[in-house]
């Protein structure tokens, strides 16, 4: 099931080596949608399809139904993944005749997974053009860098656990003395003169391609499965849905891996700004529309680990290819409550999608995500979901090959639903 979808997911990931490229990949699928500018007045029409970007790395798309509507059905995921960002003065000469790049960690990565594999650089560069400063997406798109391990002969203790020092152990090797400058390579890729390259937002990415594997091809491994599997899956559900009495909204925010606190992050005003402008265009007030709305915060969940099943909770043990995972925590780091869990599980049941539940083992704090931060700007009914995966925040992650199809089916059902929310009573049609 879902072989073709998984192949499309892998192509989507391959075309999306930075959060800017993720948004570009999404835009390619939004055919028939009108791009709105945040700096211009919006004229929205029933039956219209629209999208708006912020900072090139966050996006919201929505459709206005023909019939009267009361609220929003939203899904939100994140465009970023743990990586290494290039510093402004990135070129580092020495020791000896080596050239390296000066990077800093972005998010909480599993360091070891970044070593001994070809890497490259992608993101956006800012170029001078006439009197303007312009952004251009750049993907060097060749094997350019590698972070070499220290040989076992030089550190016999290496297999007994290792504390990585970001400033020394994870500095990528770029070339040898006399090699062409990185600025030159970037300028050429951007189609600009080197002296017109003014600044950049660039990060490293893993060159290894995604693949389907296992005895029955039941697994899929690729970079950035967290959270591009949800970015892609919620997008396909959004595009396939037939809306009725709500505005379907597809959201992708940046900077989740570093706390979401930027203007393009879930804790910024992007969500509130867009929803309040849609309300204003139809003479509605956001608080009333929000009370009639439902948000699905989609970010991947932990499957039981085959070698370390002890990290999973006693009664919450998500399996690969076991369907959509509803995530819940008493600390409210996930938005799920009893009501939103019940509503989403019921929607999945009607769509024939299996549901699993995730909770952290009670002595482990677990991770956080973007849903509860988005609710600080616009508070509404919400559920946190994801797909089960292994090796979260490795440079090469693993998930179930059939689960993407479950997410697409669940999201199509969600975006097509007619939910009438009356306090803690929700009518599903
Ligand atoms: Co995530």
Image (cartoon, rainbow, N blue to C red):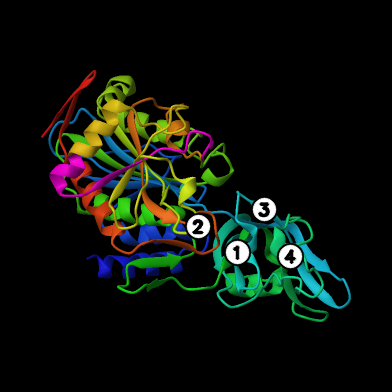
Q: What kind of element bears circle 2? A: loop
Drawn side of residue 276 relative to residue 393, left or right:
left
Decide which of tag 4 and tag 3 comes sooner along the chain. Answer: 3
**Magenta region:** 347-366
Looking at the rendered image, the disc whose residue lies closer to the viewer, 2 or 4, is 4
Decide which of tag 4 and tag 1 comes sooner along the chain. Answer: 1
Q: Which residue corresponds to mark 4?
A: 158
Q: Which residue corresponds to mark 1?
A: 113
Distance (Cα) linking label 3 and label 1? 14 Å
Quarter assignment of residue 64: top left
Distance (Cα) linking label 2 and label 4? 20 Å
Decide which of tag 3 and tag 1 comes sooner along the chain. Answer: 3
Decide which of tag 3 and tag 2 comes sooner along the chain. Answer: 3
What residue is shown at x 77% (from left), y 64% (from top)? 157
Labels 2 and 1 touching (C-beta < 8 A): yes
| Residue 350 is a magenta residue | yes
Q: What kind of element bears circle 1? A: helix
């Amino acid at each position: 099931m879902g072989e073709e979808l998984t192949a499309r997911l892998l192509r989507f990931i391959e075309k999306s080596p930075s959060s800017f490229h993720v948004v570009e990949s999404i835009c390619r699928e939004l055919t028939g949608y009108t791009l709105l500018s945040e700096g211009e007045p919006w004229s929205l029409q029933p039956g219209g399809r629209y999208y708006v970007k912020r900072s090139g790395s966050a996006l919201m798309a929505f459709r206005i139904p023909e019939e009267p509507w009361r609220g929003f059905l939203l899904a939100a995921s994140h465009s970023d993944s743990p990586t290494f960002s290039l510093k402004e003065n990135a070129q580092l000469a020495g020791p000896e005749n080596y050239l390296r790049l000066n990077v800093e960690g972005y998010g909480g990565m599993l360091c070891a997974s970044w070593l001994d594999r070809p890497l490259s650089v992608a993101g956006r560069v800012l170029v001078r053009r006439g009197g303007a400063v312009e952004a251009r997406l750049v993907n060097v798109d060749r094997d350019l860098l590698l972070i070499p391990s220290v040989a076992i002969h030089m550190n016999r203790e290496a297999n007994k656990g290792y504390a990585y020092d970001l400033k020394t152990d994870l500095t990528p090797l770029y070339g040898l003395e006399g090699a062409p400058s990185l600025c030159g390579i970037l300028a050429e890729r951007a189609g600009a003169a080197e002296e017109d390259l003014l600044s950049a937002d660039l990060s490293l990415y893993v060159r290894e391609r995604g693949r389907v594997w296992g005895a029955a091809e039941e697994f899929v491994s690729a970079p950035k499965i967290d959270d591009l599997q949800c970015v892609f899956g919620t997008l396909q559900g959004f595009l396939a849905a037939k809306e009725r009495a709500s505005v379907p909204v597809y959201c992708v925010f940046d900077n989740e891996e570093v706390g979401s606190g930027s203007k393009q992050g879930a804790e910024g005003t992007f969500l509130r700004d867009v929803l309040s402008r849609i309300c204003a265009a139809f003479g509605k007030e956001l608080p009333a529309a929000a009370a009639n709305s439902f948000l699905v915060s989609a970010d991947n969940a932990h499957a039981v680990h085959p070698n370390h099943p002890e990290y999973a909770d006693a009664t919450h043990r998500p399996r690969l290819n076991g369907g959509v995972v509803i995530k819940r925590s008493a600390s409210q780091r996930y938005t799920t409550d009893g009501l939103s869990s019940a509503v989403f599980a019921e929607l999945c049941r009607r769509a024939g999608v299996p549901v699993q539940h995730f909770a952290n083992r009670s002595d482990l704090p677990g991770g956080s995500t973007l849903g509860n931060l988005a609710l600080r700007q616009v508070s509404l009914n919400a559920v946190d979901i994801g797909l089960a995966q292994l090796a979260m925040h490795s440079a090469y992650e693993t998930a179930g090959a059939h689960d993407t199809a479950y997410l697409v089916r669940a999201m199509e059902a969600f975006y097509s639903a007619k939910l009438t929310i009356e306090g803690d009573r929700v009518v599903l049609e």
